[in-house]
Image: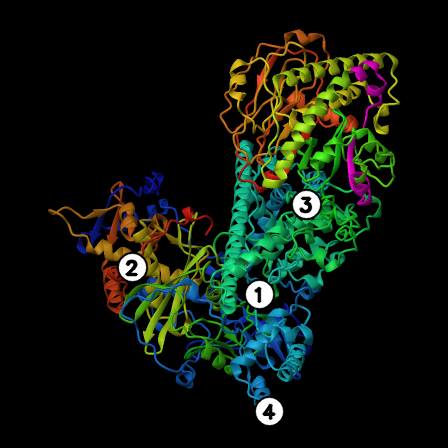
């Protein structure tokens, strides 16, 4: 039994949580942060193997102090540094990660060489040592051609791995404490279930331990120019930069029109606003204000009653507005800030210029109220037709998400392209997309009529063309629905009774549909317009 | 299991898949296991999140029930809805327009203040409203302006007063309130704003910094050629854009002037109306007075930036150190940045205001700031007022100005002016055969023009005089040869003076023509001179006595630069004479014909000064009487092969015949310099010398700063170069200036 005062970041213990069936559960959780409000301690807990959106501040009454696991002593330093790094992980996954580690040196070496020029000189010093350090690790092969021929974009990608975890929170970095004990650090992290961060740390650390003699160099390489994430796309692919700040929700509550929203994730609203109990947003321009009075005043000046873009679709009360992230920056940014509250992987690192925003609204006498939106790169190199997609929580589970998805494919149809959402998908994203794909594909399969007694047949490419769903997504959906079977030397599609029944029932519920006749959209060729 | 031993073919997306339904469905138990042949598609989720409890539960529930059960939904934080004051907050209704909503991008930014008042402000406002009236919007605008004007540092009350167009008391009250509020404010601004990135990269990992600019790295392509080409294109584009800007600015100025004119006209008409000047008598009266005054008020200023440097360089004062703020702020108002470690001179104010004692020469005094009395070494004569500037490639260009005093000045014996020059300072940047003199000494007047001279001196007119080469003076041959030259010159000068006298009256410069005879004499003279020079050089080469040579700097220099110098003087001589007169081509019949009857010729014919047998002549004709600017461009010869010979430009097409197969007998000459007068517009096309010639020229220039003189050992052919005729008449400069390049 531990005292409340002993609980520190990194501790793990069961925390009382009420599930959706109103039952009490005691899932294992990790303490991410501790704060003291007028003598009362509050603990920010992450329920392991639950989504971050359920993380919350709890009082000590909800903690089961009997079963507390303290983090290893060595982990203290990084914890203080704000790097508990506790991405939840099951034991099996940790093992997998440790295996990954053994492969790491090679890539570390490669990455070392491909850093951009400014750091190059340091690397020259480091390289030979690194090579010695790798026992029998292909001494000649990597250095030769790869280093000079690596194109730039690749190097930046690699660089992300190299940056040591000591960087994210600037204030605390203490090179002396981190650098002499890489192994201890690593193991403690593994115990902590934070293997992910340790992996990311490894290359940088490796270099450090190898160049004890050249201390300056090593420092230089770690806290030198921090790398910037890739510039395409809207989602974070590499989470190694996550620090404790972005792991925690920072906005208590948002008021938007008739609704109050509880944010799920961190969003970089101005820091001084994070302490407010409620952040007030203008429902139409999404501008944020600190108080109701501010909002009131704002509304006397803001005459928007719809998203500030061009309406490209209207059927019934549902409308879609297209907003250019370059032309209407303030709205786009405000929209992104709001969306970030509900999208974990969304990145707001770069400006909104290369994106178009499609805002779905529902009209009533007060105006066009935002229901959800998706963003889309003007030019996607990877066939993405959606970057971020979100139905605002008050409208969730009412078919709007599928409507947004349907609309995004409708745009792709007009463009004459197939498309796929940008990865990674969130859990809700995966469910929504799978559901949309399943229904869309089943609709087609069931609509096929046999001609002259022949069994109806269709190719995957045909499905893809009709629906604008990318081929890979078609295949994965067919697999997921278990429709593809191998029979008599060929692949067949089988529609079982319960699949058909289930689909028909689902389609009865799906009342909101996009009517392509109501879409007034001409795609632009962005490549010809200069850069965005 | 034997069934697994065969491999299923890969799934082919282009192959038709037959669809089996319901009863048709074959018994699939046999083939289920083979499904693995189809590679499992990734879900697209992050691995760790994929295994989250709720998702897995939801997925398995879907797979089992084919339908979502309520309990299997992924839970999310609950959000209460129904803000009860919504209707009070969002007042009014919005009617859905029939048409699709289409917004104009420029309507977006309305001029509303970004600052929104809060309840604290409201209290203040209520308090203030007891004394004066202030509306919330007014208050917000004030705060907005204050916020936007101050960055890290708050604006001062003084600045605030400038920013806000309000009552002083109100400003004070709001300002004090704002300062207090700003100090208590947690954020960097009262208008909450997203944190901006910093250029130095210190914010790269700041989670609160968002929407960074995408700075794309310049891609260095393998194809360098392409890069260079595009770089050049960019440069060109830039230049063209800046030209466009200039044009637009000029248009702006013109339009402004037009407007001004209109206003003035209006005013004049009004005034006349009030005076009752219906017949225009008063106007005419006034006009006459004005025009008389204006006659010599027209300043001969050239705004080409190449102002002749006056010699009082010693008094230069270092400019005060610029404010650090100015230096650090890269986005400041001035594009010019001082270089670190570079000492700049302060603007010279003392030159601006000079008083003159002699009212008679008042306007001359004006001129002397830019122009000075100039003499040429060869021919020894005074050419009146000119200013010298360094042109392209270090050429020395004389911009001449015609004044009423030209006729007298022209007759001044340059020797007499020598007296002035003894105490003069040598200007370093100029070529070393020339000198600008500030004359403070008196000298004896040998001419009847002593009065004028003394006047000039009293005005401290600067006299520019090419330095004499001692060598030349010491040479007896030279002396003899100079005599006829001088006589010729004298004649010409008088002729030219008459013409120039006219010029000053009617604004048209007319240069007197000369006869063929004169021209030939001149030619011969030149050739002789050059020979002499060469002889001298040879002498010198033997004796290596270059110490008495002109410039101290040149003392140690090699013989080649001596040559250059001598040649230079020859060229100068030549050029000068060429300018003064419009020579007539000697051997070309057609040219002769063309020339006859042209008295208003400004163009200059340039013979190549090489040998007696000079076959090629060129003629420059200008049919435009307004043109009086003549620029002499020395063409650079090539050492071994060709000479670029004179080019002339005229307003008529350059069709003058030219013999290219001449000058072969001039081989004995080792070094020849060629002077070619060219009538050039401002946008003169560069005469492109051959690369070797250029190199030579630079060598020469580096040795003793004689601009571009190229010795040549053999002359085999003549290269011709035509300059496009360009009309000078358009140019106001041309009316008063005679541009001349001397090498």
How packed mark 1 is, by other alpha carbons closer than 10 Å (few <14, some 14-19, many 20 or more), is some
Q: Which residues are magenta?
A: B452-480
Which circle's residue, 1 or 3, is located before the other in the chain? 3
User: In the image, which disc is placed on residue A119?
Assistant: 3
Q: Would residue B37 be seen by someone viewing this image from the given angle?
A: yes
Residue under pointer 4: B131
- Determine which quarter of the picture holds residue B689: top right
Disc 1 with disc 3 on a shared chain: yes
Residues B497 and B724: in front is B497
Chain identity of mark 3: A
Residue A384 percent coordinates (x, y): 40, 52
Q: Nearer the viewer, mark 3 or mark 2?
A: 2
Chain identity of mark 1: A
Residue A314 covered by magenta stretch: no
* Cβ–Cβ under 8 Å for marks 2 and 4: no
Q: Residue at x 52, y 59 (%)?
A: B281
- Determine which quarter of the picture holds residue A406: bottom left
Which circle's residue, 3 or 2, is located before the other in the chain? 3
Q: Nearer the viewer, mark 4 or mark 3?
A: 4
Residue under pointer 2: A520
Chain identity of mark 4: B
Tell me the quadrant of the picture where the N terminus of chain A can be found.
bottom right
Residue at mark 1 to residue at mark 3: CA–CA distance? 28 Å
Disc 3 with disc 2 on a shared chain: yes
């Amino acid at each position: 039994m531990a005292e409340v005062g002993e609980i520190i970041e990194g501790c793990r213990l069961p925390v009382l949580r009420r599930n959706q069936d109103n039952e009490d559960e005691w899932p294992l959780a990790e303490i991410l942060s501790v704060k003291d409000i007028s003598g009362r301690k509050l603990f920010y807990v992450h329920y392991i193997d639950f989504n971050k959106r359920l993380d919350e501040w709890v009082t000590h009454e909800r903690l089961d102090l009997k079963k507390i696991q303290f983090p290893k002593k060595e982990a203290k330093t990084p914890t203080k540094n704000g790097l508990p790094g506790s991405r939840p992980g099951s034991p099996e996954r940790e093992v997998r990660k440790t295996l990954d580690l053994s492969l790491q040196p090679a890539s570390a070496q490669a990455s070392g060489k491909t850093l951009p020029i400014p750091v190059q000189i340091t690397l020259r010093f480091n390289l030979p040592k690194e090579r010695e350090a790798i026992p029998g690790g292909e001494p000649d092969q990597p250095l030769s051609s790869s280093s000079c021929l690596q194109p730039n974009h690749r190097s930046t990608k690699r660089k992300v791995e190299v940056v040591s975890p000591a960087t994210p929170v600037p204030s605390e970095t203490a090179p002396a404490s981190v650098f002499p004990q890489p192994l201890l650090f690593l193991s403690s992290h593994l115990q902590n279930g934070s293997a992910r961060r340790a992996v990311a740390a490894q290359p940088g650390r490796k270099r450090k331990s190898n160049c004890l003699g050249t201390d300056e160099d090593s420092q230089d390489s770690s806290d030198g120019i921090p790398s910037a994430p890739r510039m395409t796309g809207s989602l974070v692919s590499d989470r190694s930069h996550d620090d404790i700040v972005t792991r925690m929700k920072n906005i208590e509550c948002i008021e938007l029109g008739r609704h109050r929203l509880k944010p799920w994730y961190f969003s970089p609203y101005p820091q001084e606003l994070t302490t407010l109990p409620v952040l007030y947003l203008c429902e139409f321009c999404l501008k944020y204000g600190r108080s109701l009075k501010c909002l009131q005043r704002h509304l006397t000046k803001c005459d928007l009653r719809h998203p500030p873009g061009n309406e490209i679709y209207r059927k019934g009360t549902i409308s879609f507005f297209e907003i250019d992230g370059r032309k209407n920056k303030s709205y786009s940014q405000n929209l992104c800030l709001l969306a970030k509250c509900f999208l974990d992987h969304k990145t707001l690192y770069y400006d909104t210029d290369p994106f178009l925003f499609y805002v779905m609204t529902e009209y009533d006498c007060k105006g066009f109220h935002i229901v959800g939106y998706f963003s889309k790169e003007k030019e996607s190199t990877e066939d993405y037709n959606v970057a971020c997609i979100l139905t605002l929580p008050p409208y969730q589970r009412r078919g709007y998400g599928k409507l947004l998805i349907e609309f995004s494919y409708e745009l792709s149809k007009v463009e004459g392209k197939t498309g796929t959402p940008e990865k990674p998908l969130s859990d809700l994203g995966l469910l929504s997309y799978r559901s949309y794909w399943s229904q869309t594909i089943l609709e087609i399969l069931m609509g096929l009529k046999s001609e002259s007694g022949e069994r109806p047949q269709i190719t995957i490419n045909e499905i893809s063309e009709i629906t604008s769903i990318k081929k890979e997504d078609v295949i994965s959906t067919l697999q997921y629905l278990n429709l593809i079977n191998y029979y008599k030397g060929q692949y067949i599609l089988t529609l079982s009774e319960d699949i058909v029944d289930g689909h028909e029932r689902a389609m009865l519920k799906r009342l909101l549909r996009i009517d392509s006749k109501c879409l007034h959209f001409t795609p632009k060729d962005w490549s010809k317009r200069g850069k965005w | 299991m034997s069934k697994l031993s065969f491999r299923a073919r890969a799934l082919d997306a282009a192959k038709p898949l037959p669809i089996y339904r319901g009863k048709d469905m074959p018994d699939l138990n046999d083939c289920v296991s083979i499904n693995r042949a189809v590679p499992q598609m990734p879900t697209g989720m992050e691995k760790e999140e994929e295994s989250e409890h709720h998702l897995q539960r939801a997925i398995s529930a879907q797979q089992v029930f084919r339908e979502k059960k309520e309990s299997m939904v992924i839970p999310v934080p609950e959000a209460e809805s129904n803000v009860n004051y919504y209707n009070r907050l969002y007042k009014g209704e919005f009617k859905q327009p029939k048409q699709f909503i289409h917004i104009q991008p420029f309507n977006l930014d309305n001029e509303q203040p970004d600052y929104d008042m809060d309840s604290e402000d409201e209290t203040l406002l209520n308090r203030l409203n007891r004394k004066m009236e202030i509306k919330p919007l007014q208050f917000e605008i004030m705060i907005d302006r204050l916020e936007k004007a101050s960055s890290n540092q708050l604006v001062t009350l003084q600045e605030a007063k400038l920013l806000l167009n309000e009552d002083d008391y109100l400003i004070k009250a709001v300002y004090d309130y704002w300062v207090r509020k700003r100090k208590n404010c947690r954020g960097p601004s009262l208008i909450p704003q997203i944190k901006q990135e910093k250029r130095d990269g210190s914010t790269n990992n700041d989670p609160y910094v968002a929407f960074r600019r995408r700075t794309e790295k310049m891609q260095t392509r393998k194809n360098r050629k392409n890069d260079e080409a595009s770089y050049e294109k960019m440069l060109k584009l830039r230049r063209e854009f800046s030209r466009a800007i200039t044009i637009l600015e000029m248009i702006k100025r013109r339009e402004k002037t037009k407007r001004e004119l209109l206003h003035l006209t209006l005013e004049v008409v009004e005034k006349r109306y009030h005076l009752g000047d219906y017949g225009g008598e008063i106007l005419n009266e006034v006009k006459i007075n004005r025009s008389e005054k204006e006659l010599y008020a027209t300043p001969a200023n050239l705004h080409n930036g190449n102002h002749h440097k006056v010699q009082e360089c010693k008094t230069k004062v270092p400019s005060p150190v610029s404010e650090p703020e100015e230096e650090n702020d890269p986005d400041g108002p001035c594009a010019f940045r001082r270089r670190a470690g570079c000492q700049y001179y302060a603007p010279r104010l003392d030159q601006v205001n000079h008083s003159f004692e002699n009212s008679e020469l008042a306007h001359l005094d004006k001129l002397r700031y830019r122009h000075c009395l100039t003499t040429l070494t060869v021919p020894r004569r005074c050419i009146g007022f000119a200013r010298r500037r360094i042109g392209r490639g270090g050429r020395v260009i004389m911009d001449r100005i015609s004044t009423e005093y030209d006729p007298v000045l022209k007759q001044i014996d340059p020797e007499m002016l020598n007296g002035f020059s003894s105490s003069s300072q040598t200007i370093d940047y100029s070529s070393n055969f020339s000198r600008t003199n500030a004359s403070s000494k008196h000298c004896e007047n040998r001419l009847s023009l002593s009065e004028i001279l003394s006047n000039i001196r009293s005005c401290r007119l600067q006299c520019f005089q090419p330095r004499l080469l001692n060598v030349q003076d010491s040479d007896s041959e030279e002396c003899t040869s100079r005599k006829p030259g001088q006589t010729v010159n004298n004649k010409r000068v008088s002729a030219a003076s008459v013409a120039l006298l006219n010029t000053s009256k009617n604004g048209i410069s007319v240069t007197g023509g000369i006869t063929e005879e004169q021209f030939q004499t001149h030619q011969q003279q030149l050739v002789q001179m050059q020979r002499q020079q060469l002889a001298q050089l040879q002498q010198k080469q033997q004796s290596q006595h270059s110490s008495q040579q002109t410039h101290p700097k040149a003392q140690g220099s090699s013989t080649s630069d001596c040559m250059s110098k001598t040649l230079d003087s020859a060229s100068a001589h030549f050029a000068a004479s060429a300018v003064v007169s419009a020579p007539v081509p000697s051997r070309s019949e057609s040219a002769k014909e063309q020339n006859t009857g042209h008295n208003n010729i400004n163009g200059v014919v340039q013979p190549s000064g090489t040998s007696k047998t000079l076959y090629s002549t060129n003629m420059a004709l200008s049919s435009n009487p307004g043109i009086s600017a003549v620029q002499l461009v020395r063409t650079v010869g090539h050492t071994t092969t060709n000479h670029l010979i004179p080019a002339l430009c005229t307003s008529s097409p350059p069709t003058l015949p030219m013999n290219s197969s001449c000058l072969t007998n001039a081989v004995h000459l080792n070094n020849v310099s060629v002077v070619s007068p060219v009538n050039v517009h401002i946008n003169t096309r560069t005469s492109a010398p051959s690369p070797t010639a250029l190199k030579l020229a630079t060598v020469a220039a580096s040795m003793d700063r004689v601009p571009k003189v190229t010795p040549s050992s053999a002359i085999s052919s003549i290269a011709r170069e035509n300059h496009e005729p360009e009309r000078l008449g358009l140019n106001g400069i041309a009316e008063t200036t005679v541009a001349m390049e001397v090498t």
